[in-house]
Amino acid sequence: EYTCLGDTVNLSARLMASARKNSVLVDEATYNLTKGTIVYERLDPIMVKGKSNLIPIFRALGIQKVGQIGQSRQAQLRFPWTQRCSSVGGPDPIDKLTTWGKLSWCDSLLSS
């Protein structure tokens, strides 16, 4: 038998209790880690038990559709195969590219 305790677990429980049926609410930390893959709607901050400040929250709306190489809404490079690679053991190293300059550099290496 295992038990998880702590601030993150408590906040998650509060957000689950505040979410509408069939919706997912996340805090700012989760939003920042996943905003390149998931589309969110920013909601008004809420007060939760055990916290003295308002908590910024976001409602997940769905997976970002990326059909071509390009930039995401956060100006990060996006590739159409990222989601597929993630489901079979992790993103490709090429998904770590963050600028067009790095992509051009890789292209020059491949073409030489």
Image: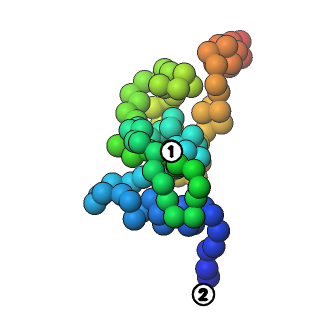
Query: Is 55 rendered above or below residue 99?
Result: below
Q: Residue 21 bears which disc, if any?
A: none
Amino acid residing under circle 2: Glu
- In the image, residue 34 lies at what x, y percent? 53, 42
Q: Secondary structure at mark 1?
A: strand
Give the mark, 2 or 1, whose residue is nearer the N terminus. Answer: 2
Q: Which residue occupies the foreground of this view, 23 or 111? A: 23
Residue 73 in view of the camera: yes
Residue drawn at (65%, 68%) of the image: 6
Disc 1 crowd, CA 10 A, few/some/many (<14, 14-19, 20+): some
Amino acid residing under circle 1: Pro
Cβ atoms at labels 2 and 1 below 8 Å apart: no
Asked where in the image residue 109 lies, by quadrant, the reply is top right
Query: Is 85 rendered above or below residue 12?
Result: above
- In the image, residue 69 lies at what x, y percent? 48, 23
Residue drawn at (48%, 54%) of the image: 47
Residue drawn at (65%, 36%) of the image: 93
Q: Residue 1 bears which disc, if any?
A: 2
Q: Secondary structure at mark 2?
A: loop
As drawn, the residue found furthest toward the bottom would be 1
- In the image, residue 89 lies at what x, y percent? 58, 52
As drawn, the residue found furthest toward the front would be 52
Q: Is residue 112 left or right of residue 28?
A: right
Asked where in the image residue 19 lies, by quadrant, the reply is bottom left
Residue drawn at (60%, 61%) of the image: 8
Circle 1 residue: 56
The quadrant in which the N terminus is found is bottom right
Cα gap from disc 2 to disc 1, whole angstroms = 33 Å
As drawn, the residue found furthest toward the left would be 21
Disc 2 crowd, CA 10 A, few/some/many (<14, 14-19, 20+): few
